[in-house]
Image (tube, rainbow, N blue to C red):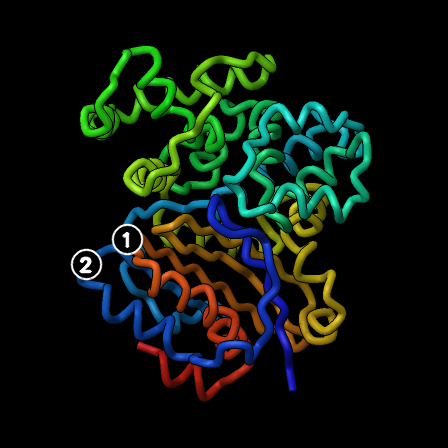
Amino acid sequence: MTDLFIPVGVAISLTAIVLWKFLYNNTEMVMKYAEKRKEKKDVSLIIKRNDEPIISINPHTVLPLASTVKIIIAIAFAKQVSDNKIDENAWVPKEELVKFYMEGTDGGAHKQWVRANSDKDQYTLKEIAIGMIAYSSNANTEFLMNYLGLEAINLLPTSLHLDSHTPIFPIVSSLYIPSYIESTEEITDKNDLLTRLKGMSRKEYIDCSLEIHEHLAANEKRGYMDKVKLDVEFQKIWSDRLPAASAQDYLSLMQMINRRKSFDDQMQRCIEEILGYALYIHKANRKWIDHGGMKGGSTLFVFTHASYTTDKEGNQTEVVFLANNLNVLSSRKLQRNFNSFLLNVLTNQEFRKKISS
């Protein structure tokens, strides 16, 4: 019997974990949820198998990506390695990562990565990139944004024709925006602060996150950093303003990687080593998957997934799922059942026929 061990990287409320095939066995839950919510335009699901569409629900709807956006940063990393702009084996002191670490906001993801790497005094750039994807370390992500440069990162969606993609900006820094605005504008009422945040334009919001990012990068301790506001209302604003894109764009991206024709050999190798690390660390996956990679993400309100696989028989499958406006129950159900759903998509022909539109 085929098993699939899947890492689920997230943005704030959970950490990168492994779910087993039959831990929660409701394989149709994901499909039913997508069908139920498709008219609300807050869910998208696209599956392709050997270039043939299996299902396509709201493919062009732009939705928050949560940690799935880290795929773009991984590709930007691989490009700079391929262009000899950075050395993937260069060492980085752990203090450079700690600058961007925010206690209690990543579900222990960064600490888990640190433990897995024996809590070293320094890490290679490649180890940091793997930590961003396999463990979903937000600190590593923000460090790489600073190291690679956001301008270079934001050129990628355009160059790859991901036309729906919104700008990528520092996600850790943006968590400080409520307290930053409260402090700098001396807003004392919570409702007034919420109104101010909701009224911010995208440019103002991103500019604010970039200013905070500069403070973190310079290791400047500011008063507004004393307390991050994680009330549900503030988390919802943060979640809704995360970088976003359509499922169709990320499906195209998964196909580019899976087909191995869009990037030069060094860049392709680097992409696969980073995106496939958490998949291939499990011996059982290597028995039936030739190559593959994935990244997931979640907030209190979002669950996302993008993956590509080529099995030992040469079958190529790409899956992208984006969901927003989740409640606690639906979020937990998706997290618990997505592994089983994906495994059936990859290995069960009858299941694929059943969900095919």
Q: CA distance from mark 2 to mark 1?
A: 10 Å
The three-letter code of the residue at mark 2 reads Lys
Of the numbered discs in the image, which one, if any, rests on residue 40?
2
Could you say which quadrant of the image residue 137 lies in? top right
Query: Residue 59 at what x, y percent from top left?
Result: 31, 57
Viewer-proximal residue among 5 and 258: 5
Residue at figure coordinates x 59%, y 64% from the top left: 6
Q: Is residue 144 left or right of residue 247?
A: right
Looking at marks 2 and 1 on the same chain, the residue that comes earlier in the sequence is marked by 2
**As drawn, is 179 to the left or to the right of 311?**
left
71 to 294, vertically: above or below: above
Badge nearest the viewer, 2 or 1: 1
The mark found on residue 122 in the picture is none
Asked if 332 appears above or below 234 in the picture, the reply is below
Q: Identify whether 139 is placed above or below 31.
A: above
Question: Where does label 1 land, which residue?
Answer: 325
Out of 264 and 47, give the one closest to the viewer: 47
Residue 274 percent coordinates (x, y): 67, 48
| Quadrant in which the N terminus is drawn | bottom right
Q: Quadrant of the C terminus?
A: bottom left
Label 2: state its secondary structure.
helix
Is residue 344 in view? yes
- Contact between labelled residues 1 and 2, with CB atoms less than 8 Å apart: yes
Q: Amino acid at mark 1?
A: Asn
> Is residue 2 toward the left or the right of residue 198 in the image?
right
Residue 356 picture location, percent across and down: 35, 78
Q: Give x and y (percent) for residue 276.
A: 66, 56
Q: Residues within 10 Å of mark 1 (few under 14, many from 20)?
A: some
